[in-house]
Image (cartoon, coloured by chain):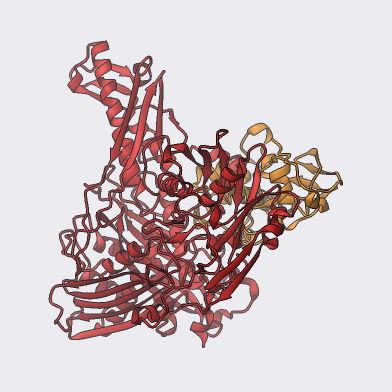
Amino acid sequence: MSINIPVSDATQSNEIYSLRVNGQVRQVKDAWIGESLLYVLRERLGLPGAKGACEQGECGSCTVIVDDKAVCSCLVMAADAVETEILTVEGLGPDGALTDVQSAFLSEGGVQCGFCTPGFIVAVHHLLENNPQPTDDEIREALSGNICRCTGYGRILEAVKTVADQRRKSS
Amino acid sequence: MSSTVAATGTRHGTLGTSASRPDGVAKVQGGFAFSSDMWADNMLWGATLRSPHPYARIISIDVSGAYAIDGVTTVITASDVPGKLTYGLIVQDQPVFAAIGDTVRYSGEPIAAVAADHPETCQRALAAIKVTYEVLTPVTNPEDCISGIAEQIHPDGNIFRHQRIISGDTSIVGAIQVEGTYEIGMQDQAFLGLESALAVPDSGGVGLEMYVATQWLHEDRKQIADCLNIPEENIRLVLGGVGGAFGAREDISLQVHTALLAMKSGRPVRISYGREESFYGHVHRHPAKIWMKHHADTNGKIVKIEARMVFDGGAYCSTSPAVLVNGITHTQGPYKCDNAIVDGWAIRTNNPPCGAMRGFGVVQACFAHESQMEKLAAAVGISPVDIRLLNAMETGDRMITGQIMDSVAPVAQCIRETDAIPMPPPMSSTADLRTIPGGTGLTAQPSNIKRGVGWGVSIKNLMYSEGFDDYSTARCRISDGVVSIKFATSEVGQGFTMLAQQIARTVLGVDDVFLDTIDTQVGSAGSTSASRQTWMSGGAVQAACRAALEQLFDHIATKNSMNRSELEIDRTDIVDRLTGQRVAVLAAIQGVDIDCTEEYHHPATEDMDENGQGNCHVAYAFVAHRAVVDVDPELGLVKVVQIATAQDVGRVLNPLSAMGQVEGGIAQGLGLAVMEEIIVKDGKVSNPSFTDYLLPTFLDAPVVEMVFIEEHEPKSPLGAKGIGEPPCISVTPAIANAIRQAIGKELPRVPIRPYDICL
């Protein structure tokens, strides 16, 4: 899926740049140079998993991984993200399979409206890669940049602990 | 976590089990289509021009500058509205666009909308539209409207509703009296998924298809059709994925604007609000000022309540009259009371419009009555638990509206079960800094921190009130061996789609249930609000499935020579009780074609008379909350340590889902208690962003210990009560009472701000 709506001169650029997203090189053309990484992922590259909910880096709904760092893609200019490795929620599970984090969000009830979920899933993967056995307080702090308005975070906490337990037992 | 749930041995996916969400996999993989993810070929972007002034007369609007910008295709103003010029849920008093010569009545009121090839082009177009205003002095104090000294700011006047309740012997005077004046700030629903809609016009220009995140498709369609002046059947509304609602999607926001732009441009148009616009685009929780005086005998038994409530509804009516009635009819809380004098006002001002938010008027009333109960306990000299047990309402009690409480009413049990939940350990001197007030900012010294415990208990009406028949419709089809269910019920995250499958699996004995598109191609489901969809749409889905099952039984009894009157579903089989003969449902539904549509209506209610008497509500649910907080009294910092709660749910239909509703509601109630407020000065919002409007984060969320009280509600089709609203209602005063207990201040206003505590 990609959207190529003709745009007017004022918001059109002749610059073509490439982003490396989920292991694939994707060309961005006819874009306005002021577009955020979030906008380009969603509206130009057909990757709507990252969500926009505050445009200020406050809510974490747009979390993606750029060069191994979890960032708010609403605060990154897309044209600034060339020559980086970008990983979005769509790139986590191979070939449509669920990751352990995605499975745990479902089995533990961490999903309601689901709008914050992709950002949380990316942030939890990042947390557990950097701190495989976090305490409850470490989980709460690491995810305090991701706002959820539906769950009150209780079932999300259970989901993260479930994955950490599973990974400990299987390692 | 302790809960009394789910019989063992129940087939997974049926009622009582934590069934899987049908939308779950798509949501965790990022593929679920929210309304803001919708697009169409040749689509334009839309945006709205809004007034910066809370009250001003529009002298002129010049849109030529917008048309001069390359990429702008369409600009619309009030003169482009072909039908009704206003919309609104109860009274259609809100202009689609403010017109030249008329006034804007709140800061953020729409004046024009544009469609262009790019969101940035839209912003440039909005900046190029020239509007000249005669700026007027806004009316911002509701009391000025009650006294009549304020200018009338709308042809309908400045009073949305004035309603009193006079009950019993109003001359009674209690030996003990406590009183207070309480204030509740303006809270925002702050759903994560911002307002968004995609409108696709028909090729012939006679109608359109629209994907929108809403709570009530059919009501939206009616209002859109009126404004567009086209028949409702020419509009197909489809539910776009909804990223939370909490009341904020009950009113029209961008629906009419998007539809108008699509019809005029002849192209698909999507409008997606940003966060700032969202603060201006939807209604909020009413700020309120409530005076209450409780009269009690020397033992603490309530003998009379006097109250005056003023709800600031802002510029347009929305649901203000209904919010007011919810507030005043819940004055007594979950307590026995024969005598009352209550005076309630819902007022129009030039402040932001207010309407539905989770709890709908009861949040405000509850903050007042639960603050009063704490004062009454202190005046009588008994504990907060004992004062509430002494007065606890029971089934059969007469309420101040004259209505007899005929719901299951386990108020005392809610209090006792909450009280039995173990308290958290005291704060350790080596506590992790993340768990103390102020967190790792190292601002609070553990030795300065004081712990407090507070209580809140509440009652909440379920479904719509005052004679409104908010029915719901569902359709069950069995065709080619497939069971499918269709309804127009808005799935906003609460999990109704999952519940509908659970109901169908339980009634029909099948495992696979196909869910048809949620749209207006079936009858109305009413709104996803008022804790009503499990009861109402759950009732409709159950009725449709039962009707289909009857036809299936007719068919299979004839075909297999079974005893028709003896057939029942046993797990996934149809069984003849007389002979023991069995047929697998999966086999029985092959080759049949059954199509049943059913409506569910709740028992009728009545309007109130001038003295507030009448059977105006359908049913009630109850909950108790106990809050434990740590407070730094010098810095004004609060950490909510634990919330214990026992909730009257009737029956747990999905344990995981029920827990999620409880924990989520508690977080929102915590927000109102200590951090969330839309700050309005002279009619202007000063914090329309997530940087400045603070929401509870993972670190702010308390540990929640919950118990579900499962006494099946006989009036409810599934035995279950709505559970969405109660969790967020009495947790707010419970936290306030805990802070009061910790530091010994009255704190009559929520949210409680640092300077309320430390100055």
Work out whether residue B10 can be spotted: no
In this view, the residue in front, B647 or B601, is B601
Q: Which chain is orange?
A: A
- How far across and how far down the image is residue B209, in percent? 52, 38
In this view, the residue in front, B158 or B673, is B158
Q: Is residue A50 left or right of residue B239?
A: right
Q: Is residue A168 left or right of residue B56?
A: right
Image height of B1 relative to A106, above or below: below
Q: What color does chain B have in the rendering?
A: red
- How far across and how far down the image is residue B690, in percent? 60, 64
Image height of B643 relative to B380, above or below: above
- How far across and how far down the image is residue B2, in percent? 38, 54
- Residue at 40% from the left image edge and 49% from the top image edge: B528
Find residue A167 and report its image quarter.
Answer: top right
Find residue B338 and report its image quarter.
Answer: bottom left
- Residue at 41% from the left image edge and 85% from the top image edge: B744
Q: Quadrant of the N terminus of chain B?
A: bottom left
- How far across and how far down the image is residue A36, in percent? 74, 53
Work out whether residue B216 can be spotted: yes
The residue at the far bottom in this view is B759
- Residue at 36% from the left image edge and 53% from the top image edge: B531
